[in-house]
Image (tube, grey):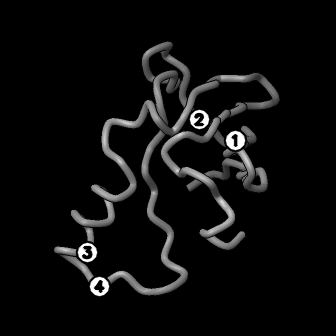
Amino acid sequence: MPAGSVPDIHRLGIKTWLNGNLMQDGNTSMMVFSSYELIEFLSARVTLRPGYVISTGTPYGVGGFRNIFLKPGDILEVQIEGVEKLTNPIRQG
């Protein structure tokens, strides 16, 4: 999706499911640092190239607070408003 087609990256709904169970239902406005701040911080330390993915973390609701941790066989899905759902099977490391 072209960046220009997203109206405001700091006001998008974000949801996370673990094995089909909704774990998070938040908004990018709830992030501690804005995307601009993260890019500024990283680009001062490394050269960012087209296609790089920056993992930003997520709003409140992560499993550690509830003693829920990923394990092999789990399916983790993340959906950001207007962006396709990302599905990750958890495999043995």
Q: In which quarter of the image is the C terminus?
A: bottom right
* Residue at which label 1 appears: 76
Mark seen at residue 43:
3
**Disc 2 packing (10 Å; few <14; some 14–19; many ≥20):** some
Tag 3–tag 2 contact (CB < 8 Å): no
Disc on res. 70: 2
Circle 4 is placed at which residue position?
47
Q: What residue type is labelled 1?
A: Leu
Q: Is residue 68 left or right of residue 56?
A: right
**In this view, the mark in front (4 or 2):** 4
Mark earlier in primary sequence (3, 1): 3
How far apart, in angstroms, are the residues tagged by discs 3 and 1? Answer: 29 Å
Mark 4 element type: loop
**Secondary element at image label 2:** loop
68 or 84: nearer the viewer = 84
Upstream in sequence: badge 3 or badge 2: 3
Quadrant hosting residue 43: bottom left
Marks 1 and 2 in Cβ contact (< 8 Å): yes
Considering only vertical position in the picture, is 84 above or below 51?
Answer: above
Q: Circles 1 and 4: CB distance less than 8 Å?
A: no
69 lies above or below 52: above
Task: Give the structural element (helix, strand or loop) at label 3.
Answer: helix
Q: Distance between the residues labelled 1 and 2?
A: 8 Å
Tell me which label, 1 or 2, sits earlier in the chain: 2
The 10 Å Cα crowd at callout 1, few under 14, some 14 to 19, many 20 or more, is some
Mark 1 vs mark 4, CA separation in Å: 29 Å
> Which is in the foreground here, disc 3 or disc 2?
3
Q: Is residue 78 left or right of residue 63?
A: right
Q: Are marks 3 and 4 in contact (CB under 8 Å)?
A: yes
